[in-house]
Image (cartoon, rainbow, N blue to C red):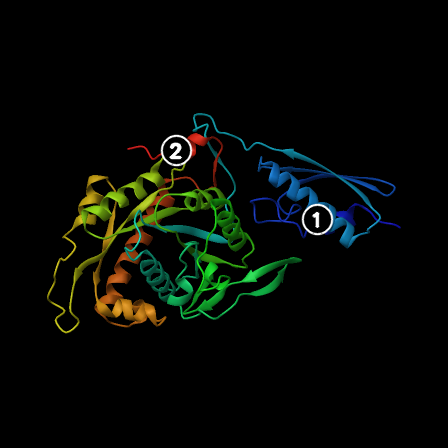
Amino acid sequence: MSFNKQDIQKALETITAPGEGKSLVENNNLKNVVIFGNEVIVEITISNPTLQAKKKVELEITKAIKSNVSENIDVKVNVTVEKPVVKENSNPNQIRGKEIPNIKNIIAIASGKGGVGKSTITANKAISLAKMGFSVGVLDADVYGPSQHIMFDVEKARPLSVKVDGRSKMKPIENYGVKLLSLGFFTDPNQAVIWRGPMASKALNQLIFDGDWGELDFLLIDLPPGTGDVHLSIVQALPVNGAVVVSTPQNIALADAKKGVAMFQQENINVPVLGIVENMAYFTPEELPNNKYYIFGKDGAKNLAEDINTQFLGEIPLVQSIRESGDVGHPVALQEGTILEEAFNKITKEMVAQLLKRNENLPPTEVVRITTMSGCSSVKK
């Protein structure tokens, strides 16, 4: 049996670095390979300090070498945890990682409260961006109630497995010029999704890092309501450029929206909030478009944005056709020359304008790595 270092390195090109989305070789995790007869010692460094990550990478390395080189090789893996550099005067509880080079801007769409139309806003923003000429992807991270696959009329589609640089990846489903990955593609629509936080986080990491997204100008992430495990997992896994918070005008929704904004502004997370969108701002009958009925209150989200010094991105009226279009998988932003298309176009342009300001005034996007439980505590007021 004859093999060399190049054979071992080639085998390790199929293994993804924990939480990085790149192979061990591509990400420079592989530090050394030593060969003594039939024994191979592999030395790697990883930034994920968990025992689970260490064991996982050890097993994957052993399996890859035995499968791709020889079953008779005695593999020993030495894993070292390399602490990312903490810059002077930076927050010691917040450690920064690397950006994802093929995705230029990652924007989280969130809400403190369910039922405010966050998924509808996400779908129509994505289509508005695509119509402007951007390459756009949507990650449906609402693990307990995914809906983007319905809104994009691809409910029965299933992502295909493709080989990218020797690794199996999921090819996103594409419709209306938008790439989409959703847990809705993999779950039974007639059964409840009952997952604990770690299971949901693992599933999301697979969608993020095992998805063949290609080059994207924007990746919009449709987050679940509230402030919980999934939100922390996203900011720990992805370099989120900014967040958009969706609310309706009434006080009960605004109280939760304020918590959603505060979560992103927490010192250990520190994701810029690009602004607030007021959904269902007023009811307008389609046959009487000039009539406005403020059934949930008036200017609630707009006033909240002023109170907490956050940009107000605009308002979307409550119109029956928005619901109807979403239900049949044909979002209203696809329309041409209508009031609704103009409304979604306006809030999308405002979001892009705020993003440009953010990118000019703040450092490049980075991954947030929370290293103490203080980063997971209740949101500071």
Nearer the observer, 77 or 353: 77
Q: Are circles 2 and 1 on residues that touch, CB within 8 Å?
A: no
Q: Position of residue 49 (x, y in %)?
A: 58, 35
- Specify the farthest residue to the top: 89
Q: Residue at x 12, y 71 (%)?
A: 288
Q: Position of residue 374 (x, y in %)?
A: 42, 30
Q: Position of residue 235 (x, y in %)?
A: 44, 43
- Can residue 301 be seen? yes
Disc number lying in front (2 or 1) = 2
Q: Position of residue 369 (x, y in %)?
A: 48, 37
| Amino acid on which the number 1 mark rests in the picture | Leu
Disc 1 target residue? 12
| 348 relative position to 366: left or right | left
**Helix, strand or loop under label 2:** loop
Locate the C terminus by quadrant: top left
Q: Residue at x 30, y 70 (%)?
A: 325
Q: Distance from label 2 to label 1 (Cα)?
A: 38 Å
| 25 relative position to 215: left or right | right
Nearer the observer, 30 or 76: 76
Q: Residues within 10 Å of mark 1 (few under 14, many from 20)?
A: many
Q: Residue at x 15, y 69 (%)?
A: 285
Disc 2 target residue? 377
Quadrant of residue 373 within the rendered picture: top left
Quadrant of residue 305 within the rendered picture: top left
N-terminal-most mark, 2 or 1: 1
- Residue 326, above or below 3: below
- Residue 60, above or below 290: above
Nearer the observer, 171 or 132: 171
Nearer the observer, 94 or 192: 192
How many labels were placed on the picture? 2
| Amino acid on which the number 2 mark rests in the picture | Ser
Q: Residue at x 66, y 40 (%)?
A: 55
